[in-house]
Amino acid sequence: MKTQIEFVNLTPGELNIDGIGVLKPSGIVAKCAPVRYHEDPLELLNGKTVRVVQQTLGEVYGIPEPKINTAYIVTGN
């Protein structure tokens, strides 16, 4: 017996997923908080320096409580 998974779109727009189809927004918008790391400045060949910031995705917020056989799709912006 195959398990049916419900996909819940927690983004503000429609998603078109191969093999599943179009998922309309659920009305709940969850996001991943950005985490920024400031690196040492880079010195360019012309003598100028540029600031370097690395960004990764952190904690998800605004997501509903987990439900069995449910996958939540969030955005990182």
Image (tube, helix red, strand yellow):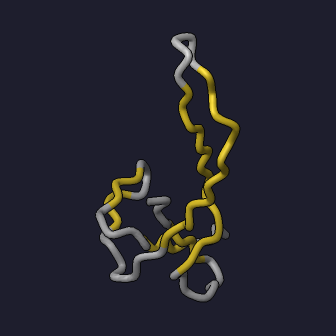
Residue at position x 47%, y 75% from top? 30
Quarter location, residue 63: bottom right
Q: Which residue of the protein is positioned furthest toward the front in this rendering?
A: 47
Residue at position x 41%, y 77% from top? 29
Relative image position of residue 1 (x, y in whole percent): 67, 70
Above or below, 61 relative to 47: below
Tag count:
0
In the foreground, 7 or 46: 46
Please give left or right for residue 16 compared with residue 57 in the image: left
Relative image position of residue 14 (x, y in whole percent): 29, 63
Residue at position x 33%, y 73% from top? 25
Quarter location, residue 61: bottom right
Above or below, 18 relative to 59: above
Q: Which residue of the protein is positioned furthest toward the bottom in this rendering?
A: 65
Please give left or right for residue 21 compared with residue 64 in the image: left
> In which quadrant of the rendered image does the C terminus lie?
bottom left
Relative image position of residue 42 (x, y in whole percent): 63, 27
In the foreground, 8 or 76: 76
Residue at position x 62%, y 85% from top? 67
Q: Which residue of the protein is positioned furthest toward the top in this rendering?
A: 45
Please give left or right for residue 55 compared with residue 15 in the image: right
Relative image position of residue 58 (x, y in whole percent): 64, 63
